[in-house]
């Protein structure tokens, strides 16, 4: 009996032992499988985290670009550019003054690899309103440059500048006794533009100069000197025919010095030659004439006519009886000089984009005074329509008194 009970007890112990071993094996198999799954999950998690980081990085870049407001156009980055306000607008004959007439507040300058000098004056350059080197979007029209930097009112379909910074035309929207011939005009590199600023496409490093003045006597002033050394560097509308300094016999050496000075300033095409009155009848290049007035005028009807017409064609220096007279915008004599020089530019009409520059004087000393300014102190004629150079210094002509 006892022997049977002992055998039964031993059998139960063996069964329990086998069961324990079996369960341990199952648990070990399950643990091994679980570890494998954790490894896969870790790899997936690492991949997901990498994607999240990349997405966050991309989002940061997008936010940065958005906050910097950088626009890429034809591979060029412009910071702060908000797009064109109205783009190109060509003037159509007969367009009413109030058509598309709007006022725009300056939207702010941009950062750009391209720039132009934007100048705003009044009274023939005697008072400066704005003078800054500003950003340019390549191939945009000049009006867009104005919209960013100045308060502008348009008229005549949107391509006409009626007011700048609150100074408005006294002609466009006025009638009767209140109507006056006071308006805005603009020059590019010293040449009166023959098209509206909503059509003209500035070139990098151009100078755009706006002036508000009376045009009751002189309707158009085709050329001014205050953008020197333009137009000799950049030309007009992207075209540069080259420059020739023509001199009378006494000024060959001085002409060479002026040539070197222009080359130092960046003028690439400049030559010198003895004065030939024939070539200025129909200019094919930019001509700078150097010599005493009487020597230049004696064989040139063009130069004699410039002196005769003076104020009517935008020239405010007059030579007579060995003296130089400085004129106001009405043609009245304001200053008289027995020994002085003059620098001024002339073109036959609006649309004549190859002006003739005069560097002249009452005598040799007067001519050398003018040459000295161009060669050694060209900033002295900055924003001048024309200049008289005397013992009293450099004066902007026309006078406004």
Image (spheres, rainbow, N blue to C red):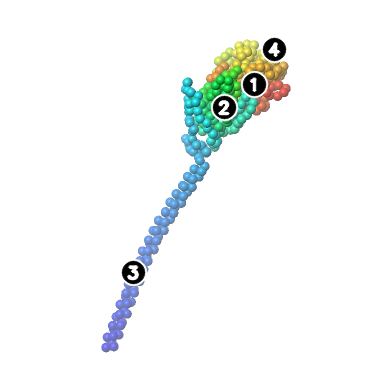
Front residue of this view, candidates 32 and 235: 235
Q: Which residue is mark 3?
A: 26
Image x and y of residue 9, in percent: 30, 83
Disc 4 from disc 3: Cα separation: 126 Å
Upstream in sequence: badge 4 or badge 3? 3
- Residue depth check, mark 1 versus mark 3: number of the one nearer the observer: 1
Please say if the residues under marks 3 and 2 sit with CB atoms less than 8 Å apart: no
Q: Residues within 10 Å of mark 1 (few under 14, many from 20)?
A: many
Q: Position of residue 392 (x, y in %)?
A: 72, 23
Question: Which label is found at residue 398?
Answer: 1
Please identify, in this view, whether the residue under mark 1 or under mark 4 is nearer the observer: 1
* 3 or 2: tag closer to the N-terminus: 3
Nearer mark to the viewer, of 3 and 2? 2
Q: Is tag 2's residue or tag 1's residue first in the polypeptide sequence? A: 2
Disc 1 or 3, which lies upstream in sequence? 3
Measure how far apart labels 2 and 1 are at the Cα level.
Answer: 22 Å
Q: Residue at x 39, y 61 (%)?
A: 38
Residue 335 vs 103, above or below: the answer is above
- Work out how far the residue at label 4 is from the one at label 2, CA to CA, in angstroms: 42 Å
- Disc 3 secondary structure class: helix
Q: Which residue is mark 2?
A: 168
Q: Is residue 392 left or right of residue 173?
A: right
């Amino acid at each position: 009996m006892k022997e049977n009970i002992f055998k039964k007890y031993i059998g139960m112990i063996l069964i329990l032992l086998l069961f324990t071993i079996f369960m341990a094996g199952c648990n070990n198999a399950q643990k091994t499988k679980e570890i494998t799954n954790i490894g896969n999950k870790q790899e997936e998690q690492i991949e997901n985290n990498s994607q999240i980081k990349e997405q966050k990085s991309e989002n940061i870049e997008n936010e940065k670009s958005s906050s910097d407001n950088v626009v890429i156009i034809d591979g060029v980055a412009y910071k702060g550019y908000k797009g064109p306000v109205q783009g190109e607008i060509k003037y159509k004959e007969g367009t009413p003054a109030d058509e598309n007439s709007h006022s725009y507040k300056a939207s702010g300058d941009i950062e750009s690899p391209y720039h132009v000098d934007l100048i705003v004056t009044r009274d023939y350059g005697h008072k400066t309103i704005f003078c800054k080197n500003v950003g340019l979007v390549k191939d945009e029209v000049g009006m867009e440059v104005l919209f960013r930097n100045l308060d502008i009112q348009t008229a005549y379909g949107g391509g006409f500048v009626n007011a700048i910074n609150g100074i408005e035309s006294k002609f466009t929207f006025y009638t009767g006794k209140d109507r006056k011939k006071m308006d805005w005009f603009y020059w590019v590199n010293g040449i009166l533009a023959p098209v509206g600023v909503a059509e003209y496409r500035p070139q990098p490093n151009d100078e755009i100069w706006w002036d508000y003045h009376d045009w009751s006597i002189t309707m158009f002033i085709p050329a001014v000197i205050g953008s020197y050394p333009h137009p000799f560097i950049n030309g007009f509308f992207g075209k540069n025919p080259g420059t020739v300094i023509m001199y009378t016999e006494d000024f060959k050496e001085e002409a060479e010095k002026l040539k070197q000075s222009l080359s130092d300033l960046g003028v690439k095409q400049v030559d010198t030659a003895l004065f030939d009155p024939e070539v200025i009848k129909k200019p094919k290049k930019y001509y700078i004439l150097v010599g005493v007035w009487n020597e230049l005028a004696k064989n040139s009807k063009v130069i004699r006519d410039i002196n005769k017409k003076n104020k009517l064609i935008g020239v405010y220096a007059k030579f007579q009886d060995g003296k130089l007279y400085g004129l106001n915008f009405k043609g009245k004599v304001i200053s008289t000089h027995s020994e002085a020089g003059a620098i001024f530019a002339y073109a036959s009409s609006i649309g004549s984009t190859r002006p003739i520059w005069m560097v002249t004087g009452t005598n040799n000393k007067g001519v050398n005074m003018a040459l000295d300014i161009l060669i050694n102190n060209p900033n002295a004629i900055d924003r001048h329509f024309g200049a008289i150079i005397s013992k009293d210094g450099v004066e902007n002509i026309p006078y406004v008194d």
